Image (cartoon, grey):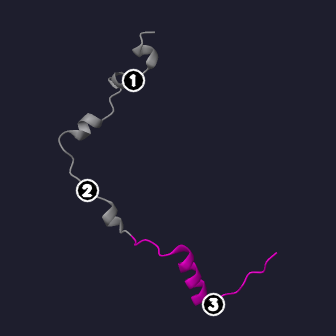
């Protein structure tokens, strides 16, 4: 088994930088999100309607008439 080698902080930092390079710049949360105003009746069209949910049902057997 090899024994861990004690390094001072500057040497360890230099070794880590040589091996991995530099981390990418941080992105603020505000830059990752965007608020957009909804157009038209999006909420009305996107609402779940159990009476019409069968309209969106897809089945290969039904499509083939089996």
In the picture of the structure, the residue carrying the numbered disc 3 is 8
In the picture of the structure, the residue carrying the numbered disc 1 is 57
In the picture of the structure, the residue carrying the numbered disc 2 is 35
Count neighbours of disc 3 (C-alpha within 10 A) and say few if under 14, some if 14 to 19, many if 20 or more. few
**Residue located 40% across and 72% down the image:** 25
The span from disc 2 to disc 1 (Cα, nearest Å) is 32 Å
Q: Please state if 38 lies on the left or on the right of 63 as rendered.
A: left
**Residue located 50% across and 75% down the image:** 21
Residue 24 spot, x, y in % from top left: 43, 71
Q: Which residues are magenta?
A: 1-26
Q: Secondary structure at mark 3?
A: loop
The span from disc 1 to disc 3 (Cα, nearest Å) is 65 Å
Q: Is residue 57 above or below residue 26?
A: above
Q: Secondary structure at mark 1?
A: loop
Q: Evaluate if marks 1 and 3 touch, with contact meaning CB atoms under 8 Å apart.
A: no
Residue 57 spot, x, y in % from top left: 39, 23
């Amino acid at each position: 088994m090899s024994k861990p080698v004690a390094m001072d902080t500057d040497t360890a930092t230099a070794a880590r930088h040589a091996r991995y390079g530099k981390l990418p710049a941080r992105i603020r949360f505000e830059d990752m999100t965007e608020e957009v105003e909804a157009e038209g009746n999006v909420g009305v069209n996107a609402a779940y309607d159990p009476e019409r949910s069968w309209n969106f049902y897809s089945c290969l057997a039904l499509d083939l008439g089996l």
